[in-house]
Image (cartoon, coloured by chain):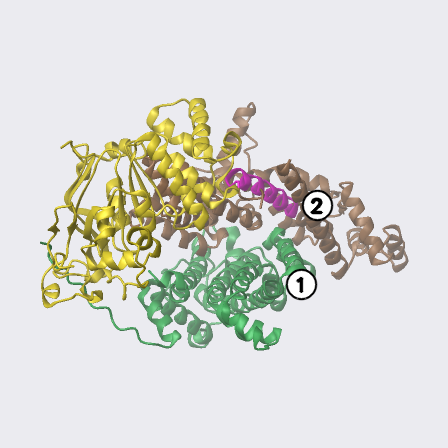
Amino acid sequence: MSEPVTLPEEAPEQARHPFTEAWEMFRRNHAALVALVLLVLICVLAVIGPVLYGRDPYDMVWAPFTRPGENWDFILGTDYLGRDLLAMIISGARVSIIIGLSAAFVSIFIGVTVGALAGFYRGWVEEALMRFTEFFQVLPTLLFSMVIVALFGASLPMITFAIGVVSWTAVARITRAEFLRIRELEYVTASRASGARNAKLMFRVILPNALPPIIVQSALMVGSAILFEAGLSFLGLTDPNVVSWGQIIGSNRTYFLDASFTVTIPGVAIFVTVLCISLVGDGLNDALNPKLRAR
Amino acid sequence: MNFLRVTLIRILYAAILLIAVLVLNFSLMHAAPGDVADTIAQAAGGIDAEALEQIRREYGLDQPFLVQLGRYIGNVLQFDLGYSYFYSDKVTNLILSRLPATLLLVISAQLLALVVGVVLGVFSARKPNGILSHFVTFLALFGYSAPVFWTGLLMLVVFSLMVPLFPVAGMRDVTIEGGFFVQALDIAHHLVLPMLTLASIFLALYSRLSRAAMMEVLGSDYVRTAKAKGLSPRQVVYKHALKNALSPVITLAGLQLSAVVSGAVLVETVFSWPGLGTLAFQSILARDTPLILGILFFSALVVIVGNLLTDLALRLVDPRVGGKR
Amino acid sequence: MTEALLKVENLRIELTTRAGVAPVIDNLSFELGHGENISFVGESGCGKSMTALAIMGLLPEGVGRVASGRILFEGEDLTAASDSRLRDIRGNEISMIFQEPMTSLNPVYTVGEQIAEVLRAHQGLSARAARDMAADLLDAVRIPNARARAGDYPFQMSGGQRQRVMIAMALACRPKILIADEPTTALDVTVQAQIFDLLRDLRRDTGTSIILITHDMGAVAEMAERMIVMYAGRNAEIGPVEQIIDHPRHPYTKGLISCVPHIMATLTEDRPDLTEVPGIVPGLREFGQDRCLFASRCAYRTEQCLRQRPPAMAFDNGQLADCWHAETL
């Protein structure tokens, strides 16, 4: 006769607030949790760092190419003009993060609008908008924004716009797919039947339910916008009066065979920030994706 | 017959997209401050207002927008993208002389990323908790988070400076003489680092996706059928599962084409690779508008042609795409 | 008595889930003779498909395993057989068709290729001979214009046609045993009848033994000589179909039969009220307990049922029922 197996009792299901549940799921992903903490630290550093550190990133304070550790006053060394690398990186954090956030906002705004309209109205609206999206997909993103910045000037708003306007297509595709799926669900039909107008259906009924994948994608967009800005400023297509991480690498590039730390250190800053963002994105995906939650 | 029709429709779409790119190009040129006449004037070191008007009339810049647009598109159809005053040459000549280098870089990096990515994905999918699987996760995170130009510079520091295996810059060594084979080998030697750098981003994407796709496919009903037929694990994985897992990867590869070309701009700049990217970089520094827009047009053309090929590959792999239904 | 073609002895299959290890098949024994048709009956989740997968050696890797017992195929224990030996048997001597014809065929290969592949693997046929034979097989499962349809992809066929392709594939090597796991559940009613007709005719022509897994008592009455009623991973009742339908010895069987009107009408004349079996199959975590697992849904429940697992009660007509009250029912 077989041994009876004892199986642990499952905890009784309680109705919990969705945010609590999402946070529970997020917390289980330790890498994401660590990344979130780091990310908060980086943001705090970007906001109050320049005040705390106090050294002007534009001042030529010491001999050029002082290696890190050579002089404890300049822990990370100095660049080709003898500017303090640490001061530059702290000051660059602000620009990189602000541009990353606002460019991501621009592309999410465009992407969600285009995707929502296409997924909601179907028919020729969808056809036209998807062709429009396809058109932006074939333009090499970096080249296109290089052209915009080159033609219309390298001010920070223009750079933000140039990044945002070329990188919304993924958001649009995801939003459209979600809208197409959700608009067929019963509760949408129900509120349609109860006389809700299109605008209400779109923004009050469908959009909130379409949000989880859009939120995950948005987190990733911030990371890629930071990378994008770094690429542009590496090429010198940036406001020459503002320090950003990519720009530090770009301006020191000529000398990197002699002083590679001027290139590797700012690169680490970009890498760590974007890595944290993508880890948090992974965590959000765990927390918000109901498909994975079933496992 | 059906295949042919679908292909023709695709080509028609591609042509429409190209025209749209031209319209955008021209509108940008029109909207930007300064025009060709200003550029010429600058190149000539300043001319008076009357001569400027003269030039404008000569180039038809006083005509209405649509007339100019029509003329621009007409010119492009005759392979005339304008004249670069910075290089004193036709834009098409300049671009065509640089295009092969970019194509070599882009195609080799994309193929490398696809092949290695799929191989990594397949192997790691068979052991979801194995070392390789964790490596793929790590690689995906690194590839996504590292700025490609930084990866390139690190590659140079490690493989040219610390361990001098590969050249620092350029596409060929002018001091090397020899036949076709020797030259090709030299180019390949120069290609290694830029190719690896560019491939690193996409390798990450493709290995992660093919791992996910493969894991899904391995759990599917038809794989169970294949096992129930008594096929060997090799046949089950490489014949039945792989062909199905390939289609999402190929679709992604198609979507990534414009990103590959964008990445190539940065990689070329890092490695002084004489392709369209370095040309774009220089033309922007020189404010050479016709050349910049010409490059934008050609790179869009590369992406569009690449998309057509992707579509074709997808239909070879998956009969459901573009068939009946 | 001749040696049975397939003999399952005291089979126990354990499934590892998040909540622990559960015996999805618990002490199951049965025999299948040459050319015989046996049916497995029971609600979803009672272990019918697991038994089939265990015979095929296809239990989900890392999740399910044969914990004890033997599966003897022509005297050879399949639970101890090597992977390559199992591959030789699968699709060749024992083959299987599945519940979901829509997803069980590989979407990216033609149906002809998918049939020909089995022939190449097991019979060593050349590519051309395998292709020809695939077309003949499609014809044998009554797909019109078979030679041309062999070049079709699964998505170009209906569900019924796909299931015919699955049958052609399974019968390609003239297997000794065909396991059909709910072959018609996903199909329209009219198509269901056609598939059963086809299976019956093929069995008559080839002499293949069939294990039919179903929850459709009507199909059992039409197709099988013997049946096994399973409940929660255990045998509830086993025996000749007519005997069981005539006089079920297990309350679960009784419930299942009374769900189907026409069997009662044709076999017994009187038309009792249609009933249903109240309640649902217990969850996996209740599997394996030392009591009658059906007790919670049973109208004949007594103290004993809750205290101890009922042993198999044998009857002279070959019926075997795992119920404390089998004799009084």
Q: Which colour represents chain C?
A: yellow
- Are discs 2 and 1 less than 8 Å apart at CB? no
Foreground: C177 or B232? Answer: C177
Q: What span is in magenta?
A: B299-319
| SS under mark 1 | loop
Q: Reply yes or no: does residue A143 show up in magenta.
A: no
Q: Chain of mark 1?
A: A
Q: What's the residue type where badge 2 is placed?
A: Ala
Q: Which colour represents chain B?
A: brown
Q: Residue at x 61, y 46 (%)?
A: B303
Residue B200 as seen in the image, left or right of residue C87: right
Q: Residues within 10 Å of mark 2 (few under 14, many from 20)?
A: some
Residue B137 as seen in the image, left or right of residue A194: left
Instruction: Relative to B203, say whether C175 is above or below.
Output: above
**Which residue, given by chain and number where applicable, does mark 1 sit on?**
A153
Q: Which colour represents chain A?
A: green
| Place of residue A151 in the rendered image (x, y in percent of width and height, measured from the top left) | 69, 59
Residue A126 as seen in the image, left or right of residue B130: right
| Place of residue B207 in the rendered image (x, y in percent of width and height, measured from the top left) | 42, 47
Instruction: Relative to B72, say whether A78 is above or below.
Output: below
Do marks 2 and 1 share a subunit?
no
**Which residue, given by chain and number where applicable, does mark 2 sit on?**
B15
CA distance for labels 2 and 1: 31 Å
Foreground: A252 or C324? Answer: C324
Overall secondary structure of the magenta section? helix
Q: Please state the total of marks drawn on the protein image.
A: 2
Q: Is residue B155 visible?
A: yes
Quarter placement of the N terminus of chain C: top left
Q: What's the residue type where badge 1 is placed?
A: Gly
Which disc is residue C252 wearing? none
